[in-house]
Amino acid sequence: MTVIRTTTLLGIAAEAALAVPGVTGLQPRLFPRLAAAAALTLTDATPRPTSPEAGIRAERAPGGSGWHIEVRCVLAEGRRTLDVAQNVHDRVRAAVISHLAALDAVERVTVHVTVTRLTTWHDGE
């Protein structure tokens, strides 16, 4: 039986999402952000950058019947939000399915994309 590491799926999903034109970043859920802020000490008051994987959640579907991936992304203004979100969905799903197939672990994958905000972004286009 192949062991599928959730942390590996997080990295694969984050890489795929960040490669989509119009995605400026991934945003973690509120709880991890609050926990990280609370962990700061007086001697180390410099906030640590959040890893891109913090904007992704991967968990086994109920009954172990596959994977559910949640992507929370920040998009650039000036692009069609729906098109970019659909592209994120498709690329993340394809990347995760490809990884699972390479491990001979063909499983159902569902992806849920949440756009958390739009931001001004100039990338030279």
Image (tube, helix red, strand yellow):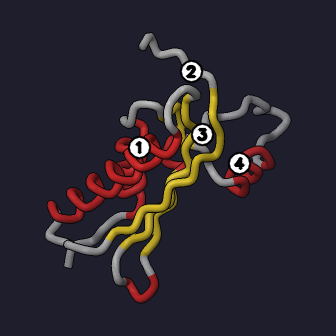
Closer to viewer: mark 2 or mark 1? 2
Residue type marked 1? Ala
Residue at the image position 36 percent from the left and 57 percent from the top: 9
Query: Which residue is under mark 3?
Result: 50
Residue type marked 3? Thr
Tell me the SS state at disc 1: helix
Query: Which residue is under mark 2?
Result: 121
Asked if disc 4 and disc 1 are in contact, CB closer than 8 Å, the reply is: no
Distance Cα–Cα, label 2 vs label 3? 19 Å
Residue type marked 4? Arg
Closer to viewer: mark 1 or mark 3? 1
Tell me the SS state at disc 2: loop
Distance Cα–Cα, label 2 vs label 1? 16 Å
Asked if disc 2 and disc 3 are in contact, CB closer than 8 Å, the reply is: no
Query: Which residue is under mark 1?
Result: 17
Asked if disc 1 and disc 3 are in contact, CB closer than 8 Å, the reply is: no
Give the x, y percent position of residue 66: 34, 76
